[in-house]
Amino acid sequence: MASKKLRIVQWTTGLVGRSAVRAVLDHPELELVGCYAWSPDKVGRDVGELCGFDEKIGVPATNDIEAILALRPDCVLYMPLQWVVDDMVRLLEAGINVVSTANFITGKSYGEQDMRRLDEAARRGGVSLYGTGINPGLANVLGLVATAVCRRVDRVSVLESVDATAYASAQTWLDIGFASPPDTPGLYERAKTRMLVFLDAVEMMAAALAVELDEVRFDVDFGVAKKDLDLGYMKIAKGTICGLKSVWSGIVAGKSVIELGLLWRLGDAMDPDWPTEEGYVIEVDGVPSVRARYAIQYPANLTDFGVATANPAVNAIRAVVAAPPGLVTADRLPLVTAAGFVAGG
């Protein structure tokens, strides 16, 4: 007997949200029943129209959270550019599971108080809250899985190294410091604060590996544009930031045991001209050592570059709905796969 479809609400229809909507519509075990849009001009419009689909899908957007609660969804895919903890708490307290890609892995980067609020709200509602994406998220899981072959682990490294020009989310890049002069006051703290979720990911990996960290360090270098860059969705002036190279390091006894590296560049003219791996490089130093490269290759006709972030969230929904109440992390869930999406399945 086929299982009952889970009722899903999509929270916002930005770059990642649009991809999530398509995945939910294509999934045989999920049903899209609602959509939250923060922008008043989107209210009442069909989600298919908001996502740029050729057809309407019969689901209007709303900015009324009470209307979302009244739908009684099983899960909300929470994907705003700027998260609102009060909204997340209301969803959880109402008995709605939440899967988020909004800078969420453990919630610690939101602050200890908000992390506790979210965990307590989920427990009161008898539901779960889970954060994922491609990185942080799936990439960290790949790093953990790579250690299974080892009988000693000295260091685990996950490096995301990509030309991210196609990721057309101008506000994301501006928030980190892109398009700013490299001598902008507070630039280090600005970048660190906006990417603080990677600290969560380091700590999640440490917990999964039963390692107690002494501290987590953040280091970053910036690359600047050698000419004016027009990316279509944003402009970056010559001499301003168009790339970064950073690493979050989990330290034990003065040594780095977990490293999450990022090399992002926009455009084709950066100084330094750091080469990219165009994917994820996973390294484990130990006995034995491991080196693996994970590359996402898009079909030539696919211009939807939010899929790598959205799909790990959509594919995790059933596992999250079945999980114990409270905050859950990837190491506490069963194996998440593309079950339901296999051709002919």
Image (cartoon, grey):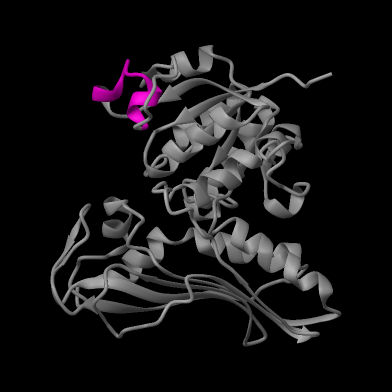
Near-viewer residue (184 or 117): 184
Is residue 50 located in the magenta-colored stretch of the structure? yes
Residue 121, placed above or below residue 227: above
Give left or right: position of 305 versus 268.
Answer: right
Q: Which region shows up in magenta?
A: 41-51
Where residue 336 sits: x, y (%)?
71, 47
Measuring 52% from the left and 60% from the top, which residue is drawn there? 297
Residue 210, placed above or below residue 11: below
Answer yes or no: is residue 131 visible.
Answer: no
Measuring 36% from the left and 55% from the top, which residue is drawn there? 167
The image quarter in which residue 205 lies: bottom right
Where residue 141 sits: x, y (%)?
67, 60
- Quadrant housing the C terminus: top right
Is residue 302 located in the magenta-colored stretch of the structure? no
Near-viewer residue (326 or 161): 161
Where residue 287 sits: x, y (%)?
81, 86
Where residue 329 sits: x, y (%)?
67, 50
The image quarter in which residue 244 lies: bottom left
Give left or right: position of 305 versus 200.
Answer: left
